[in-house]
Image (cartoon, rainbow, N blue to C red):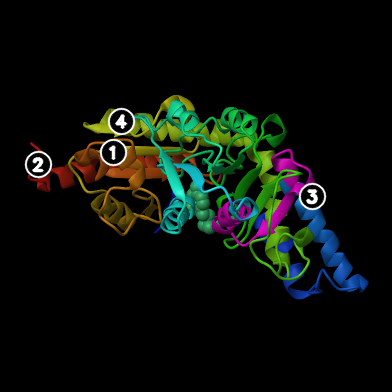
Amino acid sequence: MKTIYVDNNATTRVAPEVQEVMLPYLSEFYGNPSSMHSFGGKVAHKIEEARAKVASLINASPDEIMFTSCGTESDSTAIHATISSVPDKKHIITSRVEHPAVKNLFEHLSKKGYRVTFVPVDRKGMLDLDYLYSNLTDDTAIVSIMWANNETGMIFPVEEISQVIKKKGIVFHTDAVQAVGKMPIDVSNSEIDMLSISGHKIYAPKGIGALYVRKGTRFSPFLIGGHQEGGRRGGTENVVYIIGLGKASELAANHMGEMTTHVGKLRDKLENKLLNRIPNAMINGDKKNRLPNTTSISFEYVEGESILLMMNELGICASSGSACTSGSLEPSHVLRAMGVPFTAAHGSIRFSLGIYNTEEEIDFIVEKLPPIIENLRNMSPFWK
Ligand code: PLP
């Protein structure tokens, strides 16, 4: 059975070009980049090449990029690095719809004595900016707002937000794990202080990430150890994966046009055909402010998990809510924050497309999903 993979916000395949550049650094060139000899120096040079490629994807300067082990570590580093450099400030702000990498950290910090403001979103998933701005105080240490939501694909105006936050002298971090590689990002157009990247969302392996730290941003290291990463993160570098992330960043820059044309067209086709063929189906989010690859669709009066299982039988891999919340029958915190009615939130499916999806795959989903929903509804006591 062929796998039809439309779960690219959960993770992506490692691009063959990325695999190819990584392999020699697993076998032949195994030197430690910190060594004095030229065998290690060659590896150090490759890390700097990768750093320049990641920087170029977001128009940063290479010395503003530090490598981490994943998006979660980048988020944690940004937030911990900030709060420990301004220990007197005890107020922190984020949104209600963040990924658990930020949401759960903020909840943890609230138990440690921080006052946390969670900014609400409206029915379309857009952030309440007035609420955000009216809650900024002299005691606010950091504002962390994601660039794009992993479940709905909603894009938040983080460049604009960063300008307002900057005027107050507060640090602004954005979790851009889902935005990077799917839309052009230019940090020089903003006052963003820190920005998180994850490799496995952009066709690099799982277990590698990066954090952009604007020059001059207060920062105290989260991982204390050796002098690696300019003293910002101790630990011998994950050379092979760093090289992979560099290549993936280069590919992402080259594929940016394809994201909006090829991927965006496939997403729109999938969405339009499903909405036409399936009654009581609705998009979660606002069509105008979304990533080109993502659609979250609620099919009323059915369980998302049942839909996923039936699609899985046909080789279709999608997700209900975020990958981290699937497995639990609670509607996701994102859909709850948006006020999606219970009957719809339970039947929500996220399709997240990628550069390897084809027209034939979309046609297959469009053919197979309507009878799945019809059958499930016929079994439901709530559907008449
Ligand atoms: N932030 C967002 C928005 C995500 O979607 C994810 C992963 O799904 C993460 C952070 C965590 O990234 P990682 O899996 O690399 O830790």
Give the residue type at disc 1.
Answer: Ser
Q: Which residue is mark 2?
A: 382
Q: CA distance from mark 2 to mark 4?
A: 20 Å
Q: Quick one: label 3, few (<14), some, or many (20+) residues within 10 Å? A: some
* Residue 284 lies in the magenta stretch: no
Q: Secondary structure at mark 3?
A: helix
Q: CA distance from mark 1 to mark 2?
A: 15 Å
Give the residue type at disc 3.
Answer: Asp
Q: Which residue is mark 1?
A: 298
Q: Which residue is mark 3?
A: 63
Contact? badges 2 and 3 (CB < 8 Å) = no
> Of marks 3 and 4, which one's residue comes earlier in the chain?
3
> What quarter of the picture does the N terminus occupy?
bottom left
> Of marks 2 and 3, which one's residue comes earlier in the chain?
3
User: Which residue range is magenta in the image?
Assistant: 55-81
Q: CA distance from mark 2 to mark 3?
A: 58 Å
> Of marks 1 and 3, which one's residue comes earlier in the chain?
3
Q: Nearer the viewer, mark 1 or mark 3?
A: 3
> Of marks 1 and 4, which one's residue comes earlier in the chain?
4
Q: Nearer the viewer, mark 1 or mark 4?
A: 1
Relative placement, left or right, of 210 versus 343 is: right
Q: Position of residue 30 (x, y in %)?
A: 78, 74
Give the residue type at disc 2.
Answer: Phe
Q: CA distance from mark 1 to mark 3?
A: 44 Å
Q: Which residue is mark 4?
A: 275
